[in-house]
Amino acid sequence: TKAGSLNAKPVYLFMLAMKKPSKSAFESAIDATKEASTLHLEAMVKEKYGLYLQQQNEDKLANDCLASSYFSYYDWGAHSKALRMTQEYPFLAKASRIKAKSLFSASSNTETSSQSQSAEKSVASSTRRVSYVYNSTFRSKKEVKEKS
């Protein structure tokens, strides 16, 4: 956009997808968020897309979408949201970052390859997931225990 905000297109497409949900509407919004490098909006669109797919009884694709959303939220730093998603969707505890990323690999990636490789190694080698809550007022972080 010449004179407008770069974030306007992905937000607009997300709003259209919410107003008139369809696969193509959500996929257009996801592509726009990747193009604009708005990871937080990408996470939200993928989550809503996953919920839409659940309503359409496309559970496998919905789970992959929700897993991709989970990793986007986590990468963005919304660890509390990611933790809530693992509590709401237990399958996310065993979700694969590689599989979730490949779902939208046709579009541009938000991570560099070195970040992606190190993240994949850490997920693959780690059997215990650790989440933190950050208090910006006191500039402290506290580990949050996951419920089994």
Image (cartoon, rainbow, N blue to C red):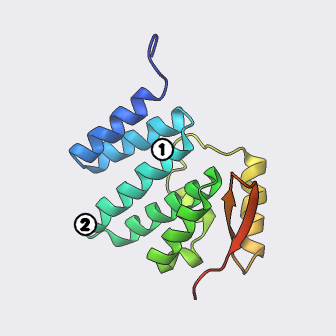
- Residue type at mark 1 is Leu
Q: Is residue 130 visible?
A: no
Q: Nearer the viewer, residue 131 or 18?
A: 131
Which residue, given by chain and number where applicable, does mark 1 sit on? 41
| Residue 125 location, quadrant | bottom right
Mark toward the viewer: 1 or 2? 1
Give the x, y percent position of residue 74.
Answer: 61, 58
In the displayed structure image, the side of residue 43 where residue 136 appears, left or right = right
In the displayed structure image, the side of residue 130 where residue 92 appears, left or right = left
Which residue, given by chain and number where applicable, does mark 2 sit on? 55
At 48% from the left edge and 44% from the top edge, which residue is drawn?
41
At 27% from the left edge and 47% from the top edge, which residue is drawn?
18
For marks 1 and 2, give the CA distance.
Answer: 21 Å
Q: Vertically, is 110 above or below 55?
A: above
| Residue 66 location, quadrant | bottom left
In the displayed structure image, the side of residue 48 where residue 19 appears, left or right = left
At 53% from the left edge and 32% from the top edge, which residue is drawn?
36
Give the x, y percent position of residue 43.
Answer: 49, 51
